[in-house]
């Protein structure tokens, strides 16, 4: 990408945001921030217990991510956030109007399989259905691109870089 954008790597749990985000940041030469690190402890406790977050739980988390993205405006960066609903992405854009969204997409069975293989993560596979039910894909007026998560992390990252570069054309 010619301009140092802040890229929000989004998608349902298990799509690889935490894997692809750092690889993408390294490829672009910008810092990476793990979106889960912005969650207050109460949110992590709820999700660990298999309880989906309510919008009221998400606002402080989204605002914190938005502040990080705002501080990186013009410098570039990559941050992960599920950003499943349009209203959540709108909230992120309040803090970082020029944010670009990279929507990691994939087959539900592949994502569930990858989630089941994860260790030491608070998000149980039981919440995957609620994630898919909540998901509102990027709309035409939103800056961003979808990228399929089949393949190796390196292949996914290269597809992401190519898709993001096409946005600048």
Image (tube, rainbow, N blue to C red):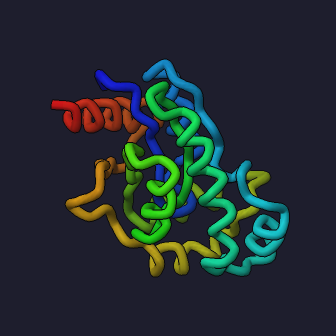
- The residue that appears at 48% across and 34% down in the rendered structure is 73
Query: In this rendering, would 120 be left or right of 90?
Result: right
Q: Residue at x 48, y 25 (%)?
A: 75
Q: Which image quadrant for residue 57?
A: bottom right
Residue under the point 54% across and 80% down: 130
Observer-nearest residue: 120 or 68? 68
Q: Residue at x 60, y 60 (%)?
A: 62
Residue 140 screen position, x and y as percent: 20, 61
Q: Which residue sits furthest left?
A: 169
Left or right side of 60 for 131 = left
Taking depth in this image into account, of 168 and 47 the one nearest to the observer is: 168
State the quadrant of the C terminus.
Answer: top left
For the N terminus, the quadrant is top left
Q: Where is residue 87 drawn, in percent x and y?
A: 44, 71
Q: Is residue 49 above or below residue 40?
A: below
**121 horizontally vs 151: left or right:** right
Nearer to the camera, 87 or 110: 87
């Amino acid at each position: 990408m010619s301009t140092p954008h802040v890229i929000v790597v989004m998608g349902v749990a298990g799509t690889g945001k935490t894997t692809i985000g750092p690889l993408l940041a390294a490829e672009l030469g910008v810092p990476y921030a793990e979106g889960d690190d912005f969650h207050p402890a109460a949110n992590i406790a709820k999700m660990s217990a298999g309880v989906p977050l309510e919008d009221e739980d998400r606002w402080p988390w989204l605002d914190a991510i938005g502040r990080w993205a705002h501080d990186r405006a013009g410098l570039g960066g990559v941050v992960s956030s599920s950003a499943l609903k349009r209203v959540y992405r709108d909230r992120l854009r309040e803090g970082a109007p020029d944010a670009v969204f990279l929507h990691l997409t994939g087959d539900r069975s592949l994502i569930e399989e990858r989630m089941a293989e994860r260790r030491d993560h608070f998000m149980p596979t039981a919440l995957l259905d609620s994630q898919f039910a909540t998901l509102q894909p990027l709309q035409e007026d939103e800056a961003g691109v979808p990228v399929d998560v089949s393949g190796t992390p390196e292949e996914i990252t290269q597809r992401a870089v190519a898709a993001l570069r096409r946005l600048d054309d």
